[in-house]
């Protein structure tokens, strides 16, 4: 879990009190839920606070303590190098001659990222499992298309001072892939070949090390269903899958972007050099996926726009409040651009209700308007990943994020069982099991998002995804009140914005006290029951069960 937010995102609150990290010692701890793994992120700015690229010894010492503490508690950290927090010095350095202005838009950032990766690999030898970049798709679209995430660039000048939504998302994504490839090259020099998790030979060679790159995406179900033959919306739904997930996995597995992207985006989609293709191929130990919800996809009325005709743009005849549900960060359509953007290029009308006369919702809504519980979509996505990427490579899948936020009725309450347990975790995990047992999908792990209520980026503390309640000092405010405060440009109570260390953990207004919700205990029992079944499967020689290794939370 991220323990801080460094950057210029706007929202109801600031991230400086967050949920604290493992060093605060305010239970419950990970061991209480009986998990043996944790997903962690190194704050990039904590290691390189300035453009000098001189490592911050205090930051390194902090993360060493955290990782040592986890390992001492028999918890294996899976550590992410980049999770939305590019140092601001790389966006707008005081000395532009340094050549790094533009962040992910600057091709030189890939070399800087490789240097950062090597430093971390050497500084934290106790960490065996690394992820280079989390949700590059979200970074590219929210930061460079919609302008609602860092660095806040888009084509709409009513919202963004700078940006070009028709080209910049593709450039940023391209440089993130290049950065991953260069980090993979560093890994190869230090540890040898990047092998697939589960390879018996490699486990002894590299002591169980792993490297991956996290993608995020929905399942897109064809909107119109027909009794015989393919749906007329099948191609549009497939394009959306490729523009969300294939955008990043195809270069890693096949060396280039999907053909649908090359056809639609044309010169705006950058090219890889032969060396970059070689770096990207065989650069992950497992396929890492973040998944939250699903949508219907339909062919737009009138067909796909001609890319040379700006008047034909504006595809959405969408009924989706989030339009394209970029992970769990509430995006909007890329308004303000007369040129085609990522939304237009994929040529898919996104819908949340089916094509029947009554227009049934694809699933019940969680606390966020974009997050609809669609368990069957989870299974279909896992099968799609298996069919597209796993068949020839034996590549296993690790679910690196899955979860939902509190509904309005359960907001800041301990009893979250009605929705989070009964309508989300229970059916989603049942579909995961079904994909493994009935369809042979090789899932090696599952991380629930998230252990603690935390700072949900532009949503601040008004969205609570944790299975453990955290007293952040804003518990008396409803989500609606927080929105009203934000709209009036009013800050939350001053005590909730006071820096954590200055205020101290004993504050009555934000004690950071952690209280397990009902979902915590349900997952604890689920993990216990799974392990009993896994042991039973091994004892009777049931390969389907014996070969499943599940990591939780």
Image (spheres, rainbow, N blue to C red):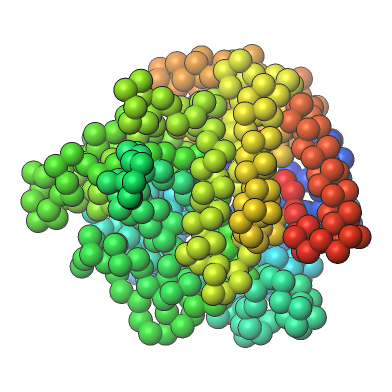
Total tally of numbered discs in the picture: 0
Vertical position of residue 43 compared to residue 393: above or below = above
Vertical position of residue 541 compared to residue 150: above or below = below
Q: Position of residue 78 (x, y in %)?
A: 70, 59
305 sits to left or right of 545: left
| Residue at screen point 24% across, 34% down | 317
Vertical position of residue 210 compared to residue 542: above or below = below
| Residue at screen point 38% across, 57% down | 242
Q: Nearer the viewer, residue 239 or 262?
A: 239
164 sits to left or right of 474: left
User: Quadrant location of residue 334?
Assistant: top left
Q: Position of residue 167 (x, y in %)?
A: 26, 58
| Residue at screen point 27% across, 66% down | 262
Query: Residue lying furthest right in this view?
Result: 539
| Residue at screen point 42% across, 79% down | 277
User: Quadrant location of residue 207?
Assistant: bottom right
Asked whether residue 92 appears in the rendered view, the answer is no
Q: Position of residue 40 (x, y in %)?
A: 68, 53
413 sits to left or right of 182: right
Q: Nearer the viewer, residue 466 or 18?
A: 466
Q: Nearer the viewer, residue 336 or 14?
A: 336
Q: Position of residue 254 (x, y in %)?
A: 43, 74
Asked whether residue 236 appears in the rendered view, the answer is yes
345 sits to left or right of 257: left
């Amino acid at each position: 879990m991220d323990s801080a937010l460094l950057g210029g995102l706007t929202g109801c609150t600031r991230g400086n009190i967050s949920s604290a990290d493992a060093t605060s010692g305010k239970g419950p701890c990970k061991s209480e839920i009986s998990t043996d793994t944790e997903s962690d992120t190194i704050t990039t700015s904590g290691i390189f606070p300035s453009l000098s690229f001189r490592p911050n010894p205090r930051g390194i010492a902090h993360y060493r303590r955290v990782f040592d503490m986890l390992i001492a508690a028999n918890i294996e950290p899976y550590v992410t190098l980049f999770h939305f927090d590019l140092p601001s010095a790389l966006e707008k350095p005081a000395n532009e001659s340094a050549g790094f202005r533009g962040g992910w838009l600057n091709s030189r950032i890939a070399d800087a990222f490789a240097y950062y990766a090597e430093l971390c690999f050497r500084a934290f030898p106790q960490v065996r499992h690394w992820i280079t970049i989390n949700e590059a798709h979200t970074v590219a679209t929210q930061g460079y298309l919609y302008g609602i995430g860092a660095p806040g660039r888009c084509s709409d000048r009513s919202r963004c001072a700078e940006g070009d939504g028709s080209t910049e998302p593709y450039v940023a994504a391209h440089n993130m892939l290049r950065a991953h490839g260069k980090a993979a090259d560093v890994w190869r020099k230090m540890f040898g070949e990047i092998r697939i998790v589960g390879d018996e030979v490699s486990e002894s060679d590299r002591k169980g090390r792993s490297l991956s790159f996290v993608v995020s995406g929905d399942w897109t179900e064809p909107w119109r269903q027909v009794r015989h033959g393919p749906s007329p919306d099948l191609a549009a739904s497939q394009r959306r899958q490729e523009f969300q997930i294939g955008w990043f996995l195809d270069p890693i597995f096949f060396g280039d972007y999907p053909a649908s992207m090359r056809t639609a985006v044309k010169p705006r989609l950058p090219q890889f050099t032969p060396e970059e293709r070689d770096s990207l191929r065989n650069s992950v130990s497992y396929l890492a996926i973040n998944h939250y919800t699903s949508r219907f996809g339909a062919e737009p009325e009138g067909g796909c726009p001609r890319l040379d005709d700006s008047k034909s743009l504006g595809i959405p005849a969408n009924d989706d409040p989030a339009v394209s549900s970029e992970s769990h960060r509430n995006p909007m359509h890329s308004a303000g651009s007369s040129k085609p953007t990522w939304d237009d290029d994929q040529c898919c009308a996104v819908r949340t209700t089916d094509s029947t006369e009554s227009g049934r919702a694809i699933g019940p809504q969680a606390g966020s308007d974009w997050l609809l519980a669609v368990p069957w979509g989870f299974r279909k996505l896992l099968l799609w990943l298996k069919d597209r990427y796993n068949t020839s490579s034996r590549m296993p899948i690790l679910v690196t994020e899955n979860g939902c936020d509190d509904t309005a009725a359960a907001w800041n309450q301990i009893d979250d069982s009605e929705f989070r347990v009964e309508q989300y975790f229970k059916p989603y995990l049942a579909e995961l099991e079904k994909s493994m047992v009935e369809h042979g999908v090789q899932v090696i792990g599952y991380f629930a998002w998230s252990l603690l209520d935390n700072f949900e980026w532009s949503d601040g503390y008004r969205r609570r995804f944790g299975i453990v309640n955290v007293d952040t000092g804003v518990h008396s405010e409803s989500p609606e009140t927080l929105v009203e405060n934000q709209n009036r440009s009013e800050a939350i109570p001053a005590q909730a914005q006071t820096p954590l260390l200055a205020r101290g953990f004993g504050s009555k207004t934000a004690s950071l006290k952690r209280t397990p919700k009902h979902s915590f205990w349900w997952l604890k029992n689920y993990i216990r029951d799974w392990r009993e079944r896994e042991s039973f499967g091994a004892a009777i020689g049931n390969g389907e069960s014996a070969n499943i290794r599940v990591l939780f939370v």
